[in-house]
């Protein structure tokens, strides 16, 4: 990728990240103040950009489909499903991480931090408003997503 295109993509990534995080902060402020509605654009941003970040997290922590699909037994689920780890080890048994993969890992941290922030906003809104009205659904959804991410990480850790 040439430097002009790389600069454009970098700019767009940072713009998306700012819009996504800004949407979560706006939802937190609205919920804290007892509001019940959020601009549809902000809600859409958390859904779409959050979905991309969730997919990235799954790819980094999880598995990718291999090009070869062999019929194997179910005794080794990874081989049976034709899957392999996202990051492959080199001959020296060290992981080679490219600049793209570093960006993916940074995006994972950003996503997890954003989910934790949504959970904090959710509980601040509950305590502040004494459960009436409920915080915005977008905060509840992102909080539930954090629980799913934590459960997935637990499964990943226990599966190794």
Image: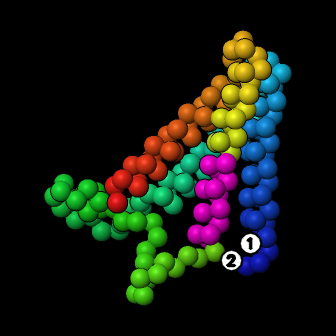
Magenta stretch bounds: 100-113
Does the stretch in magenta take in 102?
A: yes
Q: Say left or right for 23 vs 50.
A: right
Determine which quarter of the picture holds residue 64: bottom left
Residue 145 appears in view: yes
- Please tell me which residue is depicted at 80% across the width and 62% down the height of the picture: 11
Of mark 2 and mark 1, the one earlier in the sequence is 2
Nearer to me, 116 or 77: 116
Residue 41 appears in view: no
- Please tell me which residue is depicted at 54% across the width and 54% down the height of the picture: 57
Above-or-below relation of 154 to 79 = above
Predominant SS along the magenta part = helix
Residue identified by numbered label 1: 6
Residue identified by numbered label 2: 1
Please say if the residues under marks 2 and 1 sit with CB atoms less than 8 Å apart. Answer: yes
Q: Position of residue 119 (x, y in %)?
A: 65, 35
Quarter of the figure that contains the C terminus? bottom left
- Please tell me which residue is depicted at 45% across the width and 43% down the height of the picture: 151
Helix, strand or loop at label 2? It is loop
Helix, strand or loop at label 1? It is helix
């Amino acid at each position: 990728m040439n430097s002009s295109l790389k600069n454009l993509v970098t700019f767009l990534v940072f713009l998306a990240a700012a819009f996504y995080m800004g949407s979560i902060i706006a939802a937190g402020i609205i919920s804290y103040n007892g509001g019940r509605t959020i601009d549809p654009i902000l809600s859409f941003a958390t859904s779409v950009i959050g979905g991309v970040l969730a997919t990235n997290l799954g790819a980094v922590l999880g598995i990718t489909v291999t090009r070869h699909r062999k019929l194997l037994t179910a005794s080794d689920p990874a081989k049976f499903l034709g899957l392999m780890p996202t990051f492959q080890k080199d001959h020296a048994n060290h992981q080679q991480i490219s600049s793209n993969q570093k960006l993916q890992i940074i995006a994972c941290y950003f996503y997890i931090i954003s989910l934790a922030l949504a959970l904090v906003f959710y509980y601040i809104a509950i305590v502040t408003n004494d459960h009436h009205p409920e915080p915005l659904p977008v905060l509840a959804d992102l909080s539930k997503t954090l629980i799913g991410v934590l459960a997935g990480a637990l499964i990943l850790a226990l599966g190794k």
